[in-house]
Amino acid sequence: MDRRHFLASLSSPLLASCDFERGKPVLEGKLLGPDMALGHKLRDNKFAAATQTQRLPIAIIGGGIGGLSAAWRLLKRGITDFKIFELEAEPGGNSRSGASGTIAHPWGAHYLPFPTVESVNVRAILADLGVLLGDPSAIAPRYDERYVVGVPQERLYVDGLWQESVLPKIGASKRDFEQYKRFDELVERYRRLRGADGAKAFALPSALSSKQADIRALDGQTLRDFLLSQGLDSPRLHWYADYGCRDDYGAHAHHISAWAGLHYHASRDALATDADARSVLTWPQGNGWLVQQLSAWIKQRAPDAFAPQSPCVRLETAASYADIDIYNAPQDRLTRYRADQVIWAAPAQVLAHVWANSPAGLREAATQMEVSPWLVANLTLDSLPIDAGPVGLSWDNVLYDSPALGYVVATHQNIAIGPGPTVLTYYWPIDNEPVPAARKRLYDTDWKVWADAIIAELSRPHPGLREQLQHIDIWRWPHAMARPVPGFLTAPIRGLLAGLTRPLSFAHADLTGFSLFEEATYAGVRAADFAK
Ligand SMILES: Cc1cc2nc3c(=O)[nH]c(=O)nc-3n(C[C@H](O)[C@H](O)[C@H](O)COP(=O)(O)OP(=O)(O)OC[C@H]3O[C@@H](n4cnc5c(N)ncnc54)[C@H](O)[C@@H]3O)c2cc1C
């Protein structure tokens, strides 16, 4: 099915569902996502007044990577007197995971590149969790090999064939290859470049990047326009640039700032002992493993820290304290806490919504942020997917010229992969239309239509897929991640969030304008350091 027919199938649900059920048992699955009922209650903000007020030294709002990193930092500083209030029943936010039977799989974030020398706190967390072995400040640390992605790592399905690596080589012309080489040289130059301030042009975490004006000026245009200005117009190279932007930011290169687009390629320069620098850290449940281990590490030191299904529905700040209203969903009860410090680790747009006396301009600045919607599907198969050709099933299996990115294999990290069942985690940033329309589609489209579209797309490389399928569970992320569009480096929201210190500090990845484990950890640790 070509792209045009595939997109058409999305808008003709009846045809699509009949198609894949003919003569086969009905396929089942669940349509999941963040707690919409609680989220809408939060949006409508109709809660009974709080019946009691309690004192609390430190409140962390949000239990994603930012909130967990803040808690980790507080505990490292010997502070145990805090609570993490989380909207959902489970911590982890976009890095949450699930399981199909006994097979764990991601629902969102699925890997972590080897952390850079600048990612000091990510390295320290990995050392505490036993992933990084030995000295965390080493130039090339050693990692527990169970967590380094197994080979083959990645492949690309292009023009009806699988090839190794994600850069399209099948069907590429001499001109394409010349442009790949020039792009590679350009990225290498940026990787080595330091500003006059001594900082890397593109550091990870991004806040440590050079502030030099001509480097930051790259934020004034899209990555696509930047490539064209360099004489790089190969459609295959542009597909590759799109892939990087969609993978990390959920949008094509014609939406994304050239600074952010180049950051994806030029910032990842970390080394590891006994592993290829291009390998990544991953687990069957993706970064959900890190969430589980970090949560357990926190619980061991602060047993009562977690308050699930307890969103913050109102915030009011004073000079030396902040009042927060926490809605205990299971008990349908509101409690007001007066906290010396509030560490806000939920999205900026939620903060703008609940902060009663927010500074002038915050609401408008938060509304201007673009946030990408995503869909993630977990397909349970009774055996590994079958395909022809010499390039074997990899951990990451990417599709060229597809509305989705492709899939990772949850059982890839299991040393003994047998003939038994597996789970494919399929990633689909919904970015072929303006964000409001894409988000509406995400809400309005039913499970069967998504399932049909996914099966049709994956049946291109795996014609027998339908026969192997046991079920498909689908997760909708309406507000998945901030999009670093041109101008994001100087957007008013950035200055407003970075300016929050006491009694309210900001610990979500929105602080730096794009969503990665390293960015969330940077924000969480920074925010925790404002607590006395
Ligand atoms: C599909 C997908 C794939 C991704 N893949 C990767 C990847 O492979 N590698 C990577 O590094 N990153 C990936 N990411 C990015 C990922 O978002 C970050 O790595 C990281 O998880 C962001 O953490 P955070 O804490 O900043 O935000 P979030 O994950 O957004 O956490 C915020 C938390 O706040 C909670 N919350 C919201 N409102 C309230 C409220 N009012 N009160 C209390 N709690 C509230 C939410 O429920 C959530 O738990 C991916 C994201 C998505 C969506």
Image (spheres, helix red, strand yellow):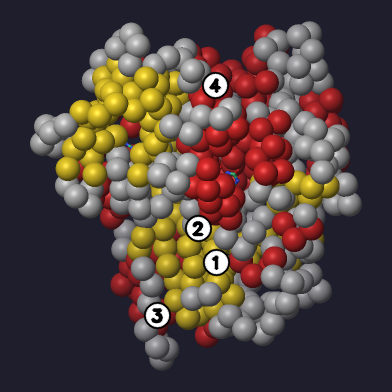
- Residue 120 x, y percent position in the rendering: 71, 31
Question: Residue at left 40%, top 44%?
Answer: 304
Q: Amino acid at mark 1?
A: Ala
Indicate which label's residue lies in the foreground, 3 or 4: 4
Q: Amino acid at mark 3?
A: Leu
Nearer-the-camera pick, 157 or 205: 205
Q: Which circle's residue, 2 or 3, is located before the other in the chain?
A: 3
Cα separation between marks 4 and 2: 29 Å
**Residue where numbered disc 1 is placed:** 104
**Residue where numbered disc 3 is placed:** 27
Indicate which label's residue lies in the foreground, 4 or 2: 4
Cα separation between marks 1 and 3: 21 Å
Residue 281, above or below 371: below
Q: Amino acid at mark 2?
A: Ser
Indicate which label's residue lies in the foreground, 2 or 3: 2
Question: Residue at left 56%, top 47%?
Answer: 297
- Residue 470 x, y percent position in the rendering: 47, 80
Q: Which circle's residue, 1 or 4, is located before the other in the chain?
A: 1
Q: Which circle's residue, 4 or 2, is located before the other in the chain?
A: 2
**Residue where numbered disc 4 is placed:** 529
Left or right: 105 as drawn, with respect to 217:
left
**Residue where numbered disc 2 is placed:** 97
Question: Residue at left 64%, top 78%?
Answer: 384
Indicate which label's residue lies in the foreground, 1 or 3: 1
